[in-house]
Each structure stands twice: as C-alpha cells, then as structure tokens.
Image (tube, rainbow, N blue to C red):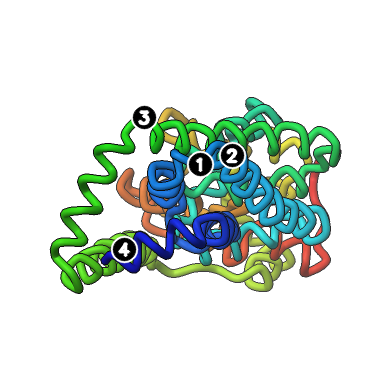
Amino acid sequence: MSYLVQFIEQFGILAVFMNVLIEQLGAPIPAYPTLVIASALMSNEPTSFRDLLLTAVVAAMIADLAWYAAGKRYGRRVLALLCRISLSPDSCVRQTESLFHRWGAPSLLVAKFIPGFASIASAMAGALGTRAPVFLLFDCLGAGIWAGSALWLGMLFRSTVGDLLSVLESLGKWGLLLIASALLLFILNRWWQRRQFIRSLRMARISVAELHDLHLLGSEPVVVDVRPAHAQSEGKIPGALAIPVDEISRAVFDMPADSEVIVYCACPNEASAAKVAKLLMNKGYKRVRPLTGGIDAWVAAGHGLER
C-alpha cells in the first residue's frame, strides 16, 4: 500500500486528471474520493490546492465540451448512448431534461453533485441550443464548485484520511484488494440496478410501421404522448392525447376498457412509455403497448407531426 501512497504523492496531478476525465466522459468510476485523497496527501505543498483545482476543472471541461459538441451535432440521439455508458436508468434523460428546462444553464452549477446528471446535462445543453459562452461559464463554475468542495474536504480531514490510508497500508495487498473490491461492487450494483430496471420494462411493443398501417386502415387507436409539456409543444403524432408522464396518474380516460392504446415518449428503451403502459394495464386497459423508438422513430420514418 505504501507504493500506492507514493504514487498519489508523485503522480497525484495526473491521477486526478485521468480519473476526472474518465468519470465525466461517463464511466462509473467516481473521481470525488480521488480528489479528497489527493488533497489530503498533497496539502503540505503550497500550490497543491491551486494545481489540483485547475487540473480537475480542465479535465471536467474537456469531457463536458465533448458531450456538448455531440449533443449539438446529434441532438437527442446522443442521450441514449450516455445513459448506456453511465449505467444510469433510462429515466435519467427525462429527469435531466426536466431539470434543465426548469433551471436552464444555471443547473450546471450543481450538475456534478447529482449522480448520472453531469454528462447528460452537458449533452442536453448542446441538444437544446445553449450558447457556447453561456455553457462554458456555468460549466466552468460548476466544475470549480464540485472539485473545490472535494479538495476542501481533503484538507479539512487530512488527518482522518491519513489514518485510513495507514490502516490500508498495514493490510498490505489485502488493502489493495479491499479498494478494488469496493470499486467492483459499486460498478456491479449500478449494473444490476439497470438490468433490473430494463427487465421491468419488458412487454409487447408496436412499431412505427404498424401504427402507421393502423391509421391507413382507419383503425384509430388511442395514442398517448407522455413527454414533458415543453417537448409536446414542439409537435406530436397526429391525434395523440398530450398527457405528461407526471400527470398520467391523475388523468381520466373516457374510453372502453378494450380500446387499443399506444403510448410513446422520447427516451431510451421507451422507459416512460412502458411505465405508463403498465399503469394503464393496472387500471384495466389490457391492449396497451409502447411505441418502439418513440416519437424519434416516427419522425425518422418520415411521418408528419401535429403542432
């Protein structure tokens, strides 16, 4: 374990840079503990706080700018990729979009303190057309607040961190094994939660082509748009009922129980649509199916929207 401490003391700046960069790119490898430990071990050096803070902010900005550019170029398509990389539940897109629309660019000030929010918020800023200077300002401030708080904690509790590292050092190789096991358990827990989430959404779905054919045949199913209100205002599938997912439990449906109901959203794995479909099925509607690919698949197929 002593060589681990020596490594952090000698290569602390590089370790912080790589860890922050990898985490902000979406990998489930937390950088906050690294910042705390590096700050505690390097607190005796006069310029350590400044150097570590600058390193963490630069690394975070590089990753965030990459996701901002991807969001600006590819729009919402990049958000699905982000959720898969981060092992976060697919509902993180809807939650992030809701927060970003409510608070705008200032939400970036606290984005890095919310699990699964930081990278998605950067991509969301690009997808929603946030101006680059505004994004850079709030993202830089947010990265500084996030990294600065970790470094401050490291300096404040440097003796406690030192005692903990001494205990791990006394354990020798078992100390390294303990750290590796904790990280592995963290990643496996995130993976298992996501796996269980996706399994809970398994149910029959309808394709865009099948829905379009139903329209052509005159068999009009009840179509429900469960996206947030701001997204619905940009256009919806013709004839769809616009009921945001947060209001679906209070909505009253005036239709027979044997009606065919199609639910759609704009989220990976049709997460929101599948949740609403299950809720409607619990209310007695048995012919309920999410639309595969949601409204993005409908638009990609060349079908028009009702505004």
Q: Quadrant of the N terminus?
A: bottom left
Identify the image quadrant of residue 115: top left
The x, y position of residue 172, in whole percent, is 18, 69
Q: Mark 1 vs mark 4: give the one in front.
A: 1
Q: Earlier along the polypeptide chain: callout 4 or callout 2?
A: 2
How dense is the environment of label 4, judged by Cα within 10 Å: few (below 14), some, or many (20 and up)? some
How dense is the environment of label 2, judged by Cα within 10 Å: few (below 14), some, or many (20 and up)? few
* 279 with respect to 298 (left or right): left
- Judging by the rendered image, the residue that carries numbered circle 2 is 47
The x, y position of residue 47, in whole percent, is 59, 39
- Whether residue 276 appears in this view of the structure is no
> Which one is in front, 269 or 13?
13
Q: Are marks 1 and 2 in contact (CB under 8 Å)?
A: yes
- Judging by the rendered image, the residue that carries numbered circle 1 is 45
- Judging by the rendered image, the residue that carries numbered circle 3 is 156
* 294 with respect to 161 (left or right): right
Q: Cα distance, mark 1 to mark 2? A: 6 Å
Q: Earlier along the polypeptide chain: callout 3 or callout 2?
A: 2
Is residue 90 positioned above or below 142 on the image? below
Image label count: 4
Q: Earlier along the polypeptide chain: callout 3 or callout 1?
A: 1
Q: Earlier along the polypeptide chain: callout 1 or callout 4?
A: 1
Q: Are marks 3 and 2 in contact (CB under 8 Å)?
A: no
